[in-house]
Amino acid sequence: MKNKKNMKKIKAAAAISALFLTALVIVSGPSLIADDTPPQGTYTSEVTVILNASDADSGVQYIHYTVVRDGVGFENQVYNESVTFVCDVPGDYTISYYAVDWAGNVEAEKSISFTILFDTTPPETEIDIIGDHL
């Protein structure tokens, strides 16, 4: 279940006033470890990224985004006004994104960075026995 407390949102205003792209990061599970400028920081669970573009005049032609994890990445271009993907592998992420409208206006590229750090240390249990021993 998504917790509103864990939802962080950045609006990325375009160089062209009519073209906007919004990045929404949804954290399912514990929230930030470090309280950096949202949605950047360190997360202890998978991160869902939603990119929403809008253009009041000619409409959004596509969203272009790049996801880089620990120096290795891929680019993608989605011919839609929205794209959703999940980052579920521990590592350092940088996501760069921009939108292009049907008039050919290109939004200035924006980026966000965050880290996913899963807890991989098992808990430890201790036992104490109290009583008279023979």
Image: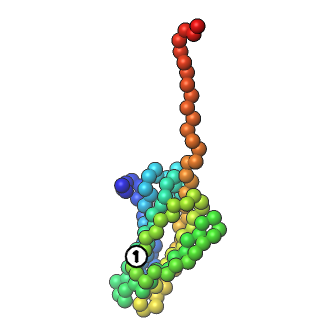
The extreme front residue here reads 134
Q: Nearer the viewer, residue 39 or 50?
A: 50
Amino acid type at mark 1:
Ser
26 is higher (above) or lower (below) than 77 = above
Disc 1 on helix, strand or loop? strand
Residue at image point 51% right, 61% down: 88
The extreme right residue here reads 71
Q: To which residue does mark 1 refer?
A: 82
Residue at image point 58% right, 7% down: 134
Residue at image point 57% right, 64% down: 93
Where residue 42 appears, x then y in whole percent?
Answer: 54, 55
The extreme bottom residue here reads 103
Q: Quadrant of the N terminus?
A: bottom left
Where residue 24 appears, x then y in whole percent?
Answer: 43, 66
Q: Can residue 81 be spotted in the picture?
A: yes
Local crowd size for mark 1, using a 10 Å CA cut-off: few (<14), some (14–19), many (≥20): some
Residue at image point 60% right, 61% down: 92
Q: Quadrant of residue 59?
A: bottom left
55 is higher (above) or lower (below) than 48 = below
